[in-house]
Amino acid sequence: MSDQQILTVIFGSVGLFMILISLIIYVFGVAVKKRKCTAETTGKVVDKVQGSDNNLYPVIEYEAGGVIYRRKKNVAAHGSINNGYPIGYELIVLYDPEKPKRCLIGGTKVQTVAAFIPAIIGLVFFTVGVVIFLF
């Protein structure tokens, strides 16, 4: 196998793997919640907790069906409280009426974009593999 073929296989494989990972994240992490989280309420940042990366992350409190829920905002998709979520800040919470603990905090746009970042990187790798193959 030539160096060109090896590089084509490596870049193409990494690209396809990252695209697959992105689709899995979207389907199991975002799409399921988007489909099930149909009820809307307002949540409020009530506390901050320290993550394993030593950043402070917001704890959101919201009411659903007369019960108060507290959830730590998704660290991977949203960033720390140092990036704009002070205590008292209000935001939209979409929750599953059948399982109110299942929720999307702050809507779905950020989660959707975050899920497709690996796909964009994978597409770059795959494109590099195709370019190496063609030239």
Image (cartoon, grey):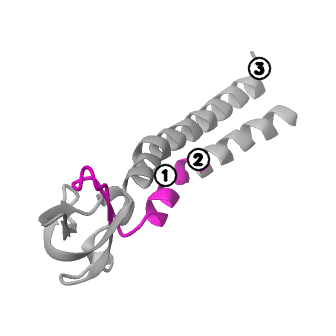
Q: Label 2 amino acid?
A: Ala
Mark 1 and mark 3: Cα distance apart in space? 35 Å
Whether the residues at callouts 1 and 2 have beta carbons within 8 Å, the answer is yes
The residue tagged 1 is 115
Mark 1 and mark 2: Cα distance apart in space? 8 Å
Q: Is residue 50 visible?
A: no
The residue tagged 3 is 2
**Residue located farthest toward the top when viewing the structure as drawn:** 1
Q: Is 82 left, or right, of 67 in this rendering?
A: right
Tell me the crowding category of disc 2: few under 14, some 14 to 19, or many 20 or more residues within 10 angstroms, Cα based: many
Is residue 40 a member of the stretch shown in magenta? no
Q: What element carries label 3?
A: loop
The residue tagged 2 is 119
Residue 27: x %, y % from top left: 48, 42
Q: Is 87 left, or right, of 107 in this rendering?
A: left
Please identify, in this view, whether the residue under mark 2 or under mark 3 is nearer the observer.
Answer: 2
